[in-house]
Image (spheres, grey):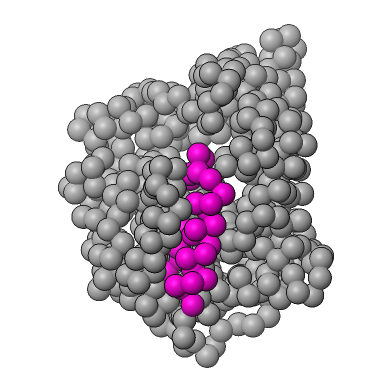
Amino acid sequence: MARDTMGAYDQEDRMSSPQLSAQGGVEEPRAELSWQEKRERRFQSWLAAPGINFVSPEAQAAYRARATRIIKCLRLEQPDRVPCILTPGNFPIHYAGITTRIAMYNVEEVKRAWRLFQRDFEGDTCAVPMIHPGRVGEITQTLTMKWPGHGLSEDVDMAQYVEGEYMMANEYDHLIKDPGDYFLRVHLPRTQAAFAPFQKLAAFRHTLGFAGGFVNAAADSEVQAAFQAMVDAGKESAAFQKAAAEVAREGQAAGFPIFFGGGANAPFDALGDTLRGTHGIMKDIYRQPEKLQEALETITPWIIEGALAQVNASGRPIVFFALHKGDDTFISDKNFEAFYWPTLKKVILGLVAEGCVPLLFAEGKMNRRLEAISDLPRSSVLWWFDRTDMARAKKVLGEVACIAGNVPASMMCLSTPQEVKEYCRKLIEDCGPGGGYILTGGANAHDTTAAHLRAMTDAVREYGVYG
């Protein structure tokens, strides 16, 4: 059973007025409030949608109805119907008649594609483009990505991450003791060839407040070129961020709330995905477990701080985690309990304490982990499952946490729309009773069709309405 480790809470004591900042986000709630009261303030800010000029009173009402529907599920209350969150991935690109490569180099085409998708499909959230700009990778000469036309065929749908041991086994102390220096002078040069000259920079800790020791290195023409590459890449990235923000504002104005407010990682994934790599971190479990544990504990507060800053800036409380290495088939139960779950739980509880809602996207299967992950405060998180047994997840977690998932991406691409609708009906029957369930995909379905996506939205309207 879950323990409410964050303290008791009376539903009648919810805060009703959000504390909005001048920037349109939400002010960090006062420390004396309970975690539930802090969360309620964040919910109310999300509902208020500060800075959004709705296209009509009907759109504003639709926005509030959709956001309320989701919030009730998160509270483990019963909404008017089961919410539906579509996971189209790069489908909007194909729907607009362009390729992923075109989208990665043309912000106007990105905006056109996602505007068209938002117009023609009615899930309960706003579709926001998440496109890796191709020119950024070219400018930084990235070694960690391949994309259409750069390492991959031009007709490939997705960019691909190139995993490697970008942090060596003997570099834990450098990361732990001086992370800024490590990322600037070691990690960036190792992963982005354009930043290789940063190895010539003086360590900040050696300058002791004297700017000259650091600035002198900028006299080197190669260092100047590296800084210019960072500026150029930043400008290109800003253009795509601006386009995504424009589409997001329009989607909200039309009545569709944005779901995510920030992002975070399991500490084990943060080290194992982009630093040590899968091969490296698995060796560390056996060759230097104490150093690995020290690093996991060290980076835990960094992850909390980063996610909280994003939530405070966005005004939306939901923090997305992609849990890559915690599924049943990747890591043993023993190592899950020793290395994966303890620090992930600390991140979760750290964010819950600040009124955030961790959304834990459990990739793969977590059938053997369900009892372990149920030990969290009631209604504090959302578990989004990929291939986990949803009927069992409802049985184990239904009184503890909102759950979401798991319409298979393979079904969305290879089955018939009617089969998708029938699968959704079964999910709603298994997971919907009493509320606390959101119908959504197990993963992004880039190669799906319009009919398959509409089968999902049709299913919740036909089978997901509560009496």
Instruction: Specify start and end residues of the magenta stretch as a single range.
Output: 437-465
Please, is residue 184 above or below residue 250 in the view? Answer: above
Q: Position of residue 141 (x, y in %)?
A: 61, 17
> Does 418 appear above or below 216?
below
Name the quadrant containing residue 268.
top left
Can residue 302 be seen by looking at this rendering?
no
Would residue 341 appear left or right of 202 to someone viewing this image? left
Where in the figure is residue 197, as x and y percent of width and height?
62, 14
Residue found at x 50% / y 39%: 447
Q: Residue furthest bottom?
A: 12
Q: Going by the image, does 452 lie left or right of 392?
A: right
- Viewer-closest of 438 and 202: 438
Question: In the displayed structure, does residue 222 sit left or right of residue 380?
Answer: right
In the image, 454 versus 345, the foreground residue is 454
Q: Going by the image, does 147 lie left or right of 63?
A: left
Q: Residue 394's x, y, as percent? A: 31, 69
From what the image shows, is residue 204 above or below residue 316? above
The reply to whether residue 434 is visible in this rendering is yes
Residue 168 position in % (x across, y down): 38, 23
Q: Residue at x 37, y 35 (%)?
A: 272
Residue at screen point 57% across, 42% down = 91
What residue lies at 24% left-to-right and 47% top-to-bottom?
Answer: 328
**Vertical placement of 118 versus 91: above or below?**
below
